Image: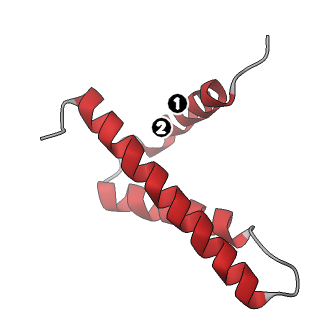
Amino acid sequence: MEMTQATEIEEIAEQIKPFLAGYEPMVKSAVLAELLSLLLAGFVVPGERKQTERLRERVLEAHCELVRALTKVNAEMLGTDQ
C-alpha cells in the first residue's frame, strides 16, 4: 500500500511528539529551532552565497506560512482558538 505524503508526515510527527513531551515550551522551541536551522542549512546554491541566502529566506518564509496555517487548524482541534 502506498503511503500518501500527508499520512507519512502525520506518522513521523506522531513518532517525534513523545520525545518532546514533558519539556518546557521554551526548550521545545529551541529544539525545533535547532532542527529548522539544520534543514535550512541544507538548502544551498553551490558557489552562490547570495542565491543561497535568498533560497533559505524563501524556504523559511514558506515554512512560517505553513506553521501559521497549521497553528490555526491545531488550535481549533485543541479548543484553544480563542
Task: For the C terminus, give its image quadrant.
Answer: top left
Q: Which mark is residue 17?
A: 2
- Marks 1,2: beta carbons within 8 A: yes
Q: Which residue is mark 1?
A: 14
The residue at the point 70 percent across, 72 percent down is 41
Q: Secondary structure at mark 1?
A: helix
**In the figure, is residue 35 to the left or right of 4?**
left
Q: Amino acid at mark 2?
A: Lys
Q: Secondary structure at mark 2?
A: helix
How crowded pointer 2 is (Cα within 10 Å; few <14, some 14-19, many 20+) is rated as few
Q: Say which quarter of the image contains residue 35.
A: bottom right
Counting from the top left corner in percent of width and height, residue 44 is at 78, 74
Q: Say which quarter of the image contains residue 24.
A: bottom left
Q: Residue furthest right?
A: 47
The residue at the point 82 percent across, 87 percent down is 48
| Above or below 10: residue 16 | below
How crowded pointer 1 is (Cα within 10 Å; few <14, some 14-19, many 20+) is rated as few
Q: Nearer the viewer, residue 49 or 27?
A: 49
| Above or below 51: residue 1 | above
Q: Which mark is residue 41?
A: none
